[in-house]
Image: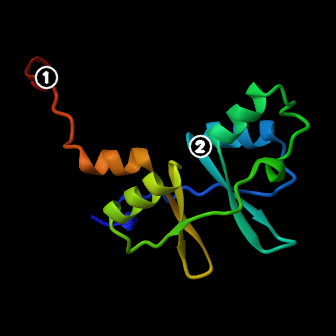
């Protein structure tokens, strides 16, 4: 199975000036764990994850003042839609992260997470016989 088959195509793109609270609200509304941070001044892509927000709040930082740009990972490993899920999982395990931005051409087309990979590698849940009928 390939990354294109597992990735979420719901890509939230925010700017570096968004506050952590704004980013968290947008991520929660879409039920996603990461946002792509696009800095139009540098044409760079980064990623802000739920863990980045959690770490900032846990350190006592104010989510209404702290910006996404201050907590964005800019040294990002990108995946291609044609990667295998094994390649994506190996990149995540090697890098110690749970999300990969999927690039096709010049822009992001999706995000693949550990959860996406597990969902694809795990057989579909069966309904208990008592509930099946």
Q: Mark 2 points at which residue?
A: 30
Image quadrant where one finds the N terminus: bottom left
Q: In which quarter of the image is residue 29?
A: top right
Is 3 in front, or is 130? 3
Residue lying farthest to the front in this orientation: 94
37, above or below 52, in the image: below
Residue sitting at 59 percent across and 43 percent down?
30
- Residue 64: give x, y in percent of width and height: 88, 34
Toward the right, the furthest residue is 65
Q: Which residue is drawn at 56% across and 65% down?
A: 77
Residue, x 16% and y 28% (percent of image)?
127
Question: Left or right: 39 with respect to 94?
Answer: right
Report the disc number at residue 73.
Answer: none
Marks 1 and 2 sit apart, C-alpha to C-alpha, by 30 Å
x%, y% of residue 119? 32, 45
Q: Which residue lies furthest to the top in this view?
A: 130
Instruction: Give neighbour class at mark 2: few <14, some 14-19, many 20+ (Cα, 10 Å).
Output: few
Q: Earlier in the sequence, mark 1 or mark 2?
A: 2
Q: Quadrant of the C terminus?
A: top left
Q: Residue at image x 12%, y 26%?
A: 132
The residue under label 1 is 128
**Residue 103 appears in which quarter of the rendering?**
bottom right
């Amino acid at each position: 199975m390939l990354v294109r088959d597992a990735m979420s195509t719901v890509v939230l793109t925010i700017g570096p000036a968004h506050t952590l609270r704004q980013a968290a609200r947008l991520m929660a509304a879409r039920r996603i764990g990461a946002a792509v941070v696009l800095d139009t001044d540098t044409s760079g892509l980064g990623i802000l994850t739920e863990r980045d927000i959690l770490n900032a709040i846990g350190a006592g930082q104010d989510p209404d003042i702290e910006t996404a740009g201050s907590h964005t990972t800019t040294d990002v490993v990108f995946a291609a839609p044609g990667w295998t899920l094994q390649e994506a999982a190996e990149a995540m395990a090697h890098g110690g992260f749970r999300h990969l931005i999927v690039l096709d051409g010049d822009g992001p087309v999706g995000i693949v997470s550990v959860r996406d990979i597990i969902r694809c590698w795990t057989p579909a849940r069966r309904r208990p016989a008592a509930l099946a009928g």
